[in-house]
Amino acid sequence: MPVQCLSQQAFPGTNAILAAALVAVLSGCAHVPMVSKSGFNLALTTTATLNNCGKSTAFPLQYRVLQVSDASPLAGMRLERLWDHEGDMLGGALVWKGPAMSITPGTKRKDEPVAIDPRTKAIVVLGNFCKTNESCFYYVQSVAKKKVDLELTADATCLTPTKR
């Protein structure tokens, strides 16, 4: 008797189990990384002086991503009035508010892509600095297409585009 027949007699249903496993993997039960063709991608680099409060010791920075239909309400806004009060301060212009995230001094972080809401006209990255210079605690990126890649650097007091 051929080996295949012996294995089917010894383990009935083996082919069905293998076929079911293959279908499960091919149908999406297995996690396969996807390359995003749309959405917002943030890469944040920090300096060794990150969020140092004007002193010699650097501290981690909390930051958050917002999607807004109009960025003009941010003009002249102070960090202490805005952080954790985005909904109150931006009103109907706030489309989406991401969770607070943290990054340590001297590191680089690439966040998971975020889908862009169709009502969004600008992406705002807020840094909760202990001391900042005017409005550089936030960075606004206009949304003109389905995919936005943004690379920022956070230093002692500000968020700025990363120099290449």
Image: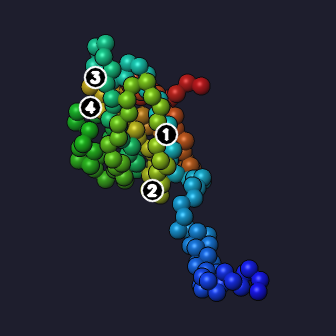
Q: Amino acid at mark 1?
A: Lys
Q: Characterize the local packing of mark 2: few (<14), some (14-19) or many (20 or more) Cα atoms within 10 angstroms.
A: some
Q: Give the residue furthest to the right.
A: 2
**Of callouts 3 and 4, the N-terminal one:** 4
Q: Characterize the local packing of mark 4: few (<14), some (14-19) or many (20 or more) Cα atoms within 10 angstroms.
A: few
**Of callouts 1 and 4, the N-terminal one:** 4
Q: Amino acid at mark 3?
A: Lys
Q: Give the labeled residue for mark 1.
A: 110
Q: Is residue 76 visible?
A: no
- In front of the other: 66 or 41: 41
Depth check, mark 1 against mark 3: the one in front is 1
Q: Amino acid at mark 4?
A: Arg
Q: Characterize the local packing of mark 3: few (<14), some (14-19) or many (20 or more) Cα atoms within 10 angstroms.
A: some
Q: Give the labeled residue for mark 3.
A: 131
Depth check, mark 1 against mark 4: the one in front is 1
**Of callouts 2 and 4, the N-terminal one:** 4
Q: Residue 116: x percent and y percent?
A: 47, 53
Q: Amino acid at mark 2?
A: Asp
Q: Give the labeled residue for mark 2.
A: 117
Q: Give the labeled residue for mark 4.
A: 78
Rounded to the nearest whole Å, what is the CA distance between mark 2 and mark 3? 31 Å
Mark 1 falls on what kind of element? Answer: strand
**Of callouts 1 and 2, the N-terminal one:** 1
**Of callouts 2 and 3, the N-terminal one:** 2
